[in-house]
Image (cartoon, rainbow, N blue to C red):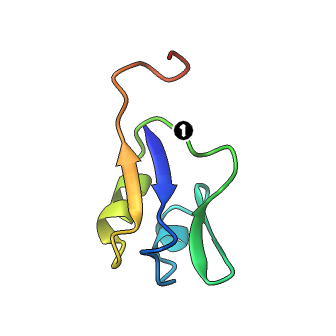
Amino acid sequence: MRISVDRDLCYGSAECAHRAPAVFDFIDGYGVVRPGHEETGENPSILEAAERCPSQAISIAHSSSPPGHP
C-alpha cells in the first residue's frame, strides 16, 4: 500500500506519529511519512493512524500487485 499525508489538510495533531512512529514523523508542525516508508505492506498501526487522523489527511492506496512488483 502507498501512504501519503496531505499537508494542506493536516493541522498538526500528531496522531499519526503517536500511533505509528516507525512510519510517521512530526516535522515543522505537520505529520509526514518517514523517507523509505511511502510503500509498505498492510500494517494495523498505519491503518489506525489513518482512521484516527482528525483532519483525515492520511491517504492509503492499496495496490493490486504484491510489494516489489509493478
**Residue placed most toward the observer, 66 or 48:** 66
**Residue placed most toward the observer, 17 or 57:** 57
Which residue is rendered at x = 36% and y = 72% of the image? 53
Q: Residue furthest front?
A: 8
Which residue is rendered at x = 47% and y = 67% of the image? 19
Residue 27 against residue 23 in the figure, above or below: below
> Is 21 positioned to the left or the right of 11 in the image?
right
Asked whether residue 57 appears in the rendered view, the answer is: yes
Asked whether residue 44 appears in the rendered view, the answer is: no
Residue 65 image offset from top left, x and y in percent:
40, 19
Q: Residue furthest top?
A: 69
Residue 42 image offset from top left, x and y in percent:
40, 39
> Is 22 positioned to the left or the right of 4 in the image?
right
Residue 58 against residue 67 in the figure, above or below: below
Quadrant location of residue 15?
bottom left
Q: Quadrant of the N terminus?
A: top left
Which residue is rendered at x = 40% and y = 68% of the image? 57
Residue 54 image offset from top left, x and y in percent:
33, 79
Instruction: Identify residue type, mark 1.
Output: Glu
| SS for callout 1 | loop
Which residue is rendered at x = 43% and y = 54% of the image? 46
**Residue occupied by mark 1:** 39
Label 1 packing within 10 angstroms: few (<14), some (14-19), many (20+): some
> Is 18 positioned to the left or the right of 48 in the image?
right
Q: Residue furthest left?
A: 51
Residue 3 image offset from top left, x and y in percent:
47, 49
Give the number of callouts: 1
Quadrant location of residue 59?
bottom left
